[in-house]
Image (spheres, helix red, strand yellow):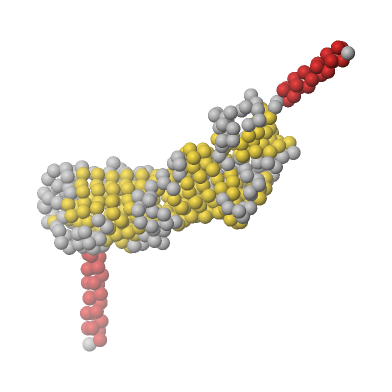
Amino acid sequence: MNMKMLKISSTISATSIVLCGALHAQVYWDINGTNAGATNSTDASGTWDIATTSNWNTASDGTAAVTTFTDTDSVVFSAGNNVSTAAITATGTPTATNLTIEEGTYTFDGNLKLGAAATYTVSSGASATFNDAVSLTDNADFVIEGASSIKLSGAGKTFTKTGSGTLTLIDSANSDYAINVNEGLVVINRTATKLLKSIVVGASGTLQLSTSDQLNPLTVNGLFIMDSGVSDSLGQLYGTGSIQAGDNTSLNIDKGNFSGDISGDLDISISKTNGFTFNDGSSVEFIIGADGVSNSITSGDANMSELNLNGELTFDLTGADLTEGNSWLIVDVSALSVTYGATFSIADFSESGGTWTYDSNALLQFSETTGYLTVVPESSSYALLAGCLGLTFVMQRRRK
């Protein structure tokens, strides 16, 4: 009796497993019934709902009987390969375990969810725009070879971006998810203001900031691009990669250390008392313009934050007004506690007693004590002035 009950229970359990597997079927978008492909034209627009509208097919070529979507199915857009464009309207917030855009240009309206350990894929040449929230219910993989713009939501979740394509984040609601940019480009173009968490840009990845935002912490081992006019507030900055800044950009940092290179018109401010270090091997560029016009490293508050300079500074003098007496604040030593390390240097300058000198049709000096770069009279000018004074003195004596 007991053995019979055990056998029945085992059969039920096995059947349950099979049924649960079936609940996570892979289905293909298909609005033209059993005809091959997803549409009888090139437009496959339609409604994505739960268990109502038969716009799906279990056959990849679209020739099986159409069926409805079951929540947590894996979905592919589309059956066959004949879709050029499609406007998809989602109702009831469908949850897809995996979501794939194989070909064509898709626009999605209505809220969606990505299920547990989901993968979102956009094939090369395809594109997808999500005008309403796509929520992460778990960490997810985004494999983007084409292009996608998405309003993402997923507090505390992480997505990892691979593939050579471009993913643009256009969130309008606050959500503090984390990002790993392992490959390709991720563009942050959000109107949301809540702090993004733990962004890591891998050696083969690029992160582009198109709107002012808050990223914390940020590790840059690849490329971080800041568009012109953008400001960013970082709790922490680390990495060995590159930061490229457009005109009139700013970056506020609370703490960390950086071993990579920074180029462009980027004002850097250091806040709080944790301190920040530019490591040996790092490089920071300063764009020198009219008198007093340049980017600089300053304090972001009144805490006299520690700044350790162990790398190299470089000066772009292409647009510099090298009129004698002109000067530029490079490092605000009056508001920062600055330490110049043994490996600190300035490209093309020579140092003596904390003063760095370079002759570029004008004599330039950077003072570690003041933090200013200044155009000073050249030694030849001093010699000419001394000669003129001596000649004046001799002539006066002869007149006597």
Q: Residue furthest front?
A: 400
The residue shown at (16%, 60%) is 68
Q: Is residue 291 left or right of residue 156?
A: right
Q: Tell me where residue 12 sits by quadrant.
A: bottom left
Q: Residue furthest bottom?
A: 1
The C terminus lies in which quarter of the figure? Answer: top right
The residue shown at (70%, 27%) is 377
Q: Is residue 214 left or right of residue 312?
A: left
Q: Whole-percent x and y of residue 398?
A: 87, 12
Can residue 182 be seen here?
no
Can residue 65 be seen here?
yes
The N terminus lies in which quarter of the figure? Answer: bottom left
The residue shown at (18%, 49%) is 45
Vertical comparison of 169 with 95: above or below: above
Q: Tell me where residue 344 sits by quadrant.
A: top right
Q: Whole-percent x and y of residue 178?
A: 42, 56
Question: Depth check: 297 or 139 in front?
Answer: 297
Q: Whole-percent x and y of residue 239?
A: 53, 49
